[in-house]
Image (spheres, coloured by chain):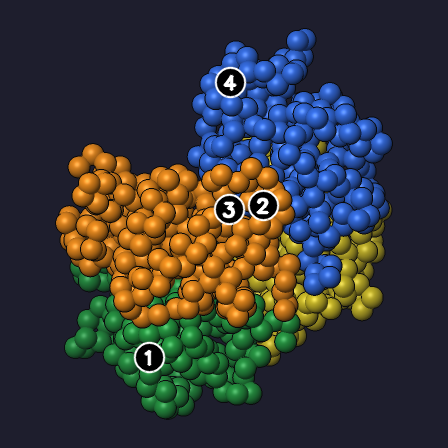
Chain colours: A green, B yellow, C blue, D orange
């Protein structure tokens, strides 16, 4: 249980930080980290927890079908998204926020199917990006109620954009990930910064 | 007095959090929680307290007519609103903030008598809302000086909008509530987020 | 020295809070409190101190001509303004911030000689204001280098607007005061909130 | 090693403060301080560290060619810029942030080659500035990948603007400096405040 405990502490810390910045208000947002690979075990935030008070005791363990294998409570309703990202990207950690700018921009750019961010130094904070000239395309997917049913479509989107470090859900928020929790946290801060920059630059539309 | 002590500690915590986010500056805002039902006893913030330093010692107990039954000091001038909400909704806790966006939007939409918020995932943070397609109508009431006299009108508004999770007072702020303090706190964060999103989207008007 | 110690601790706390909100960045802002009346002794922040680290040891004591009577270091270059406010209003404490909105609005409304704020509930946080229908007129004075020489003009402005709870210095910031430190702190939060509301409402101009 | 330890603690504190304000998200930003002059030894943040958790253990020591002389890890990729500033200005400390407004304004004003800030009281927080009538010209340089190769051009820019307290890198951020760490920190807060003021004043463009 060593890996789980470490992941749980790290997830709680990341959740509290996201809440402090206003990116996970009202029990929104969820965070996960892989704690074992064969078979898969994912540590993930319990549903309905105030992220400003998130503690390791609010983290569950689920298997590759989202069934709870450790801890008590209901896993996040979006566990299927986390599992799809882990499967498609080999991610070690996934961060999901409901921030102001991801909410507004995912709606404003929905018709184009995504949002391009290009030419900012901050892009180099994304894994594998070596130059600010990089063009990051964030796919935007429609918001739905049943993410388990939507998993195949989500996998298609991830496969169609193999370079993407994140995607947006329309009027809902941001999903990003990383090799481990530190990288996912870095991607989160990088992308939230860039979304605010792009948002302020293009507002009022 | 166990229930009162727990409520007082929770109210102080919620007040400090609201102040930290800039939603209750300058001693504005007030917060209450039901501690007994038969007869009603309501724990509520004392008038004129700096919410950044709010402690359990600043919480009073009042009865269903707003008379102080415990603690020292004057209850908030808006105690009548809290009592009306508790009576009309069966709420266990009420939160009132003077935030920037509730102040501006309550004025901008006053002529329509309310503000609609629709299609955001964050809406699912409101009790009983199962889909982001939900349309939340926040009634807007005029600001007055004497809320005790206004109580019947306020009850009418609450009855006319039985689904509303909150209402706005023009150029004044937001009132929301919940079954208990945690739910009221969640509704507060959800609505403040949504008001900022709607505000930024529609500005400049 | 009891009164001085208490004032110094209170001033340091107020300064750190203003810095945290971004109202006193880069050693800007200064804060004072009367500790004795006959003869006058004023506790005031030392010049050039980072308000994020403000401690009681950074507070000096000056007399009614701004001469240091206790502590080491140079008093703020704007000590003359604090003394003028204390003399004209009988204030027990004075708070001065360099906030974003006081800087921008003091310039935008300079030609009118002041800024009116009217009809907001938050106005009732100002001492003696009993209704949100209140109209607060904040005089705007030009920024100068030598405030000692400017003291007579400043006194005239204060006398010409006996109801004003504050004034702005063009492209410089806000001055407000109160009967004691708590009231000055409340006026500061109330006015910074109102300036942001008015600023966002009128932007872009 | 006394000077290094003191510098390392001060740099870690400055980095955490910049991160808290959102000026150094996603491991962006870097900070340095001179700890010895003959030969030069510079304490500087290690590459890729989360500034929200920056500790003294994340600070390296480098010589005047950027070679590591103490500590473990890779120095920031922009060490050459820090060294160029120290050489050209005799600075004792350098602060670099990736803030929202420095990112946006460095792009908006790139065609003019710089950004003028004039007439604000806050300018007096810059070393040697005695009047708010001061006009600060912040040169803007293009963003590049290889700063070591760019060092001569950067030195030319610094020599061409001997009065400048800072410069911007296009779509990248702000560089400022000071005689010591406290002065660099003060310049950072002063300039970030002024950039936000100028940015909000001129937006939408």
> Quick one: label 3, few (<14), some, or many (20+) residues within 10 Å?
many
Q: Mark 1 points at which residue?
A: A85
Mark 1 vs mark 4: give the one in front: 4
The count of marks equals 4
- Residue D123, percent from left and from top: 55, 44
Residue wearing tag 2: D134
The part of the image, by quadrant, that contains residue C122 is top right
At 45% from the left and 54% from the top, the residue drawn is D161
- Residue C161 visible in this rendered orientation of the protein: yes
CA separation, marks 3 and 1?
43 Å
**Image position of A44 (left or right of B187):** left
Percent from the top left, x then y, of residue D105?
A: 53, 63
Q: Which of C196 and C103 is in front in this view?
A: C103
- Chain letter of disc 2? D
Determine whether the residue tagged by mark 3 lies in a helix, strand or loop. Answer: helix
How far apart are labels 2 and 3 at the CA level?
A: 14 Å
**Residue at screen point 45% across, 60% down:** D168
Q: Mark 4 points at which residue?
A: C5
- Whether residues under marks 3 and 1 lie with C-beta atoms below 8 angstroms apart, the answer is no
Residue D190, label in figure = 3
């Amino acid at each position: 249980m060593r890996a789980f405990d470490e992941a749980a502490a790290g997830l709680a810390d990341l959740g509290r930080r996201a809440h402090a910045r206003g990116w996970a208000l009202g029990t929104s947002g969820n965070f996960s980290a892989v704690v074992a690979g064969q078979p898969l075990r994912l540590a993930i935030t319990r549903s309905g927890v105030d992220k400003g008070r998130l503690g390791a005791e609010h983290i569950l363990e689920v298997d590759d079908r989202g069934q709870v294998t450790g801890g008590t409570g209901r896993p996040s309703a979006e566990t299927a998204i986390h599992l799809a990202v882990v499967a498609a990207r080999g991610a070690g950690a996934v961060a999901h926020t409901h921030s102001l700018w991801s909410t507004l921009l995912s709606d404003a750019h929905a018709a184009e199917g995504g949002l391009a961010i290009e030419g900012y130094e901050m892009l180099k904070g994304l894994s594998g990006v070596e130059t600010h000239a990089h063009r990051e395309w964030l796919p935007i997917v429609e918001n739905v109620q049943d993410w388990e049913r939507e998993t195949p479509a989500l996998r298609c989107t991830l496969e169609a954009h193999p370079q993407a470090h994140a995607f947006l859900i329309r009027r809902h928020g941001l999903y990003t990930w990383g090799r481990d929790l530190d990288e996912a946290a870095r991607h989160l801060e990088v992308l939230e910064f860039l979304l605010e920059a792009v948002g302020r630059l293009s507002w009022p539309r």
